[in-house]
Image (cartoon, rainbow, N blue to C red):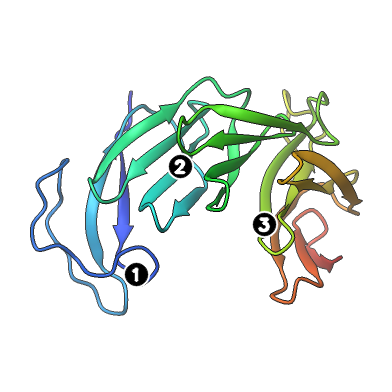
Amino acid sequence: MKKSFVILLMLSMLLVSKARAQYTTGQQLPMTHMSGLLRLVETIPLPGDGYMDHVAADVKGQRLFISGEAAKSLLAVDLRAGKLIHETKGLADMPKRSFYLPESDEVWLALANSSVVAISGTTYEVTKTVKLSGFGDPNRGADNGAYDPATHLMYICVEVFEDFGGSGDHGSNNASVDIVDTRTAQLVGSIKLPGGDPAGIAIEPSGKRLYVAILWTGKATSR
């Protein structure tokens, strides 16, 4: 049975300066007022069935990029028009964490096959591919990540499974955080981790430390 998907767009200072009084595009749900700083502004139907994951925002261009994991595609939504404007299909594997780089007008996207691709914000085609340390290993795959705009470096979590095609349980070691230079489209380093599932990652504002939450050990570590 197919599932229908909608984006719930929340009013915030980041993406929307003020709400429009009326909307004429797409299938709209009734306006709902909620307490606090955020409230529902608009809903935008999306095609296909299956689950989706991370999003990246082009604030200036008012676009939202959505990782369509099940469809192995990247969806581009025009927030001004309130509609889907493109779907990049046929990605090599499930898309995970994504980042929009305004200086190059590219979406950098981590894939589950331990690779990273750059997708043009103009043509919406894959223009660059970087193989990570786990590429070619069916039991290692990229997932979450962080981006440092000061250094133009991506930090991608590579998780490890005991048997991805079988139990799907995470392994106990050999995970890593792989470092990709988006200026040269090259893998420039890999940080080995003590666990198997680096699920959460964040960069300190000063850029001096990288924090990684490893669910397998139940501990947090910094590098």
Q: Name the kind of residue labelled 1 in the image.
A: Ser
Q: CA distance from mark 2 to mark 1?
A: 18 Å
Please identify, in this view, whether the residue under mark 2 or under mark 3 is nearer the observer. 3
Place of residue 149 in the rendered image (x, y in percent of width and height, measured from the top left): 66, 61
Location of residue 164 by image quarter: top right
User: From the image, which quarter does the C terminus lie in?
Assistant: bottom right
- The quarter of the picture where residue 27 lies is top left
Mark 1 secondary-structure assignment? loop
Specify whether residue 220 is in view: yes
Label 2 residue SS? strand
Q: Which residue is mark 3?
A: 147
Label 3: few (<14), some or many (≥20) within 10 Å? many
Q: Amino acid at mark 3?
A: Tyr
Q: Earlier in the sequence, mark 2 or mark 1?
A: 1
Residue occupied by mark 2:
66
Give the quarter of the figure containing the N terminus. top left
Residue bearing mark 1: 12
Q: For residue 118, what is the image quadrant?
A: top right
The crowd level at tag 2 (other Cα within 10 Å; few <14, some 14-19, many 20+) is: many
Residue 17 rendering spot, x and y as whole percentages:
28, 69
- Seen at 12% across and 56% down, the residue is 30
Taking the image as shown, residue 128 lies to the left or right of residue 222, namely left
| Residue at x-position 14% and y-position 61% | 31
Above or below residue 129? Residue 81 is below
- State the residue at coordinates (88%, 47%): 190
Q: Which mark is residue 180?
A: none
Residue 172 seen: no
Give the x, y percent position of residue 89.
48, 23
